Amino acid sequence: VQALEGVDTEVPILLAASAGAIPAAALLVAALKAKKADLSQAQLSLGFDPLGALASKGSLPMSLDQAYDQLADLTKWAVAHAPKSLTLVACGRPYHESGANAVQDLAFTLSSAVATLRALEARGVSVEDAASRMLVRLSVGGNFFMEIAKLRAMRVLWAQVVRACGGSDEAAKIHLHARSGLFNKTQFDPHVNMLRGTTEAFAAVVGGADSLHVAPYDAVLSQIPSDQGRRVARNTQIMLREESRLDHVVDLAGGSWAVETLTHQLCVAAWKLFQEVEAMGGMLSLIHI
């Protein structure tokens, strides 16, 4: 309850707790109930990506089957009680922060998402329900036009996967969350990170991200960034919205020959790699190599 003090419960809330997402989600729901929030209208992003967490940490505090069991139960609960909430995640951050290029980032994230769809379908959750509650989280790097095209390509690839699995056009609509990357941030001159974070935030908005997290410029110096770092990160987004008015345009990059061509090239290359990964047994087989 204290964490939500002063927070309008009608505002979308994203909970990023990795493998601890399920107990954290239970605490969040309990706190919202204590505030007498209407869960049927709440826009929550819960859950986690088991394969992404495995790739990032090397292990999980539970078995992979148990993780998918919990996510299936959470999704079934959301279908009945919180229909506007997202309970599944496909996270590309572990691959991006490990040096993956845009094609690898897309293919690996897509393969992880497909693994979750299959696991939940085996547990009685339809593709329609699972796909419509999937949050795709991607990190954004410094290659400006490439990152714009990457986000746009993910929308195309996700729709292609969902339709191939029998999902509707509505379920094929992606919920895309972008975060400024960390691996290109410097500890030696952290103020430079303000500039990098700004261009990455700009690329994320132009690429069509539904939500955005800009990391504080001094996040690489400490697990707890300074008040100034958090303030600059927040104000970066506010300036892009309120002063640059980027939210007043439906598709900022639509019709750009360069961006459209690059997006198409990424789609083709990422789909080919995705098929190769699936032929090898999916992301789990790659993580275990």
Image: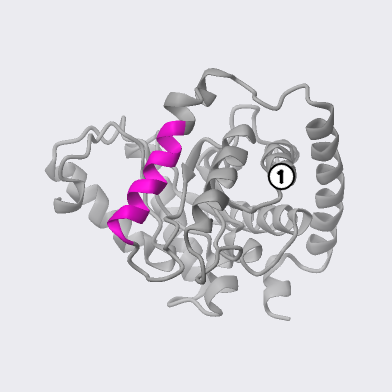
Side of 152 where 257 appears, left or right: right
- The x, y position of residue 89, in whole percent, is 52, 52
Q: Position of residue 86 (x, y in %)?
A: 44, 43
147 on left or right of 6: right
Helix, strand or loop at mark 1: helix
Report the amino acid beneath label 1: Lys
The question of residue 266 being in magenta is answered with: no
190 w.r.t. 12: above or below:
below
Dot 1 corresponds to which residue? 150
Task: Tell me: 254 left or right of 76.
Answer: right
Tell me if residue 196 can be seen: yes
The stretch in magenta equals: 226-239
Q: Position of residue 171 (x, y in %)?
A: 59, 33
Q: Residue at x 14, y 52 (%)?
A: 2
Image-based side of 131 in relation to 228, left or right: right
Q: Dividing the picture into quarters, in which one does residue 259 lie?
A: top right
137, 274: nearer the viewer: 137
Front position in the image: 250 or 131: 250
Residue 193 lies, with reference to residue 9, above or below; the image says: below
Mark yes or no: residue 124 visible: no
Q: Quadrant of residue 221?
A: bottom left
Q: Residue at x 31, y 61 (%)?
A: 226
Quadrant including the C terminus: bottom right
Identify the residue at image location x=24%, y=36%: 9
Q: Position of residue 270 (x, y in %)?
A: 81, 51
Residue at 35% across / 62% down in the picture?
A: 225
Relative vertical location of residue 64 with respect to residue 211 in this rendering, above or below: below
Which residue is at the front of the view, 253 or 103? 253
Q: Residues within 10 Å of mark 1 (few under 14, many from 20)?
A: many
Numbered disc total? 1
Q: Main secondary structure of the magenta part?
A: helix
